[in-house]
Image (cartoon, grey):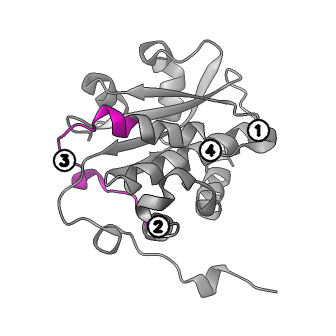
Amino acid sequence: MKKYLFAFVILSMGMGALSIFAQQAGPAGVIINHYAANNNQFVAGTIPGADLDRIVQAGVRAPSAGNRQPWHFTVVQDLTLVKKIVPQAVNGNVLIVISAEGGGKINGAQIIDCALAAESVYLAAQALGYGSRIYTGPIDSINRSLKSDLGLPVGHSAVVLVRAGRISAGIDAVSAASSRRSANDLVTYK
């Protein structure tokens, strides 16, 4: 259920994220043309600190129900830790783990709020020219055995993470995107 709810939020809430990047990328450019970079499209190379700060700030500024902002962002740059979570990662990839308070009992509103923050981080990375990908698969493993290694706040559990990093030259939404179902099959106007 959580995975379906998360996917719904990510797919349906794309327009609420990037006001701080609108002047640089155009208000619809990144939102309409985003794509999840494949593992083989990430290449070695660091993200400068100023860019990483802007990416994280996009998550901090994400919308949340009732402005509760239930999240905490853990920025993982240590390659050994990164590879424990995403084995295909390369030097310079960063994982931004978004957690919420509640131990093992994260509620639906927290999941949606953290998903909105993840989407903001994901889109911000692309607006700045980096590849990004959202992961939920490693979350159970993080919560079982890596919370202390990552330094998650006491009482928090990971909800979602975003991988960001440099990508191969020439990769764009047209060449890298997976196939999509037609809007005619997915949208109803009344």
Residue 87 position by quadrant: top left
Tell me the residue that label 1 is attached to.
Answer: 67
Would you say 138 lies left or right of 182 here?
left
At label 4, counting other C-alpha atoms closer than 10 Å, the crowd grade (few under 14, some 14-19, many 20 or more) is many
- Between circles 4 and 2, the one closer to the viewer is 2
Q: Earlier in the sequence, mark 4 or mark 2?
A: 2
Instruction: Give how far across and how far down residue 151 sits, in percent.
Output: 48, 14
Mark 3–mark 2 Cα distance, whole angstroms, equals: 26 Å
Asked whether 187 falls inside the magenta stretch, the response is no
Q: Nearer the viewer, mark 2 or mark 1?
A: 2
Q: Residues within 10 Å of mark 2 (few under 14, many from 20)?
A: few
Disc nearer the start of the sequence (4/1): 4
Label located before the other in sequence (1 or 3): 3
Q: Amino acid at mark 1?
A: Asn
Where does the image place residue 22, in percent across and percent down from the top left? Answer: 50, 60
Numbered disc 2: secondary structure: loop
Gap in angstroms between the C-alphas marked 4 and 1:
9 Å
Label 3, on which residue?
A: 43
Residue at 65 percent across and 56 percent down: it is: 9
Q: Which residue is mark 4?
A: 62
Label 2 near label 3: C-beta < 8 Å?
no
Residue at numbered disc 2: 26
Label located before the other in sequence (3 or 4): 3
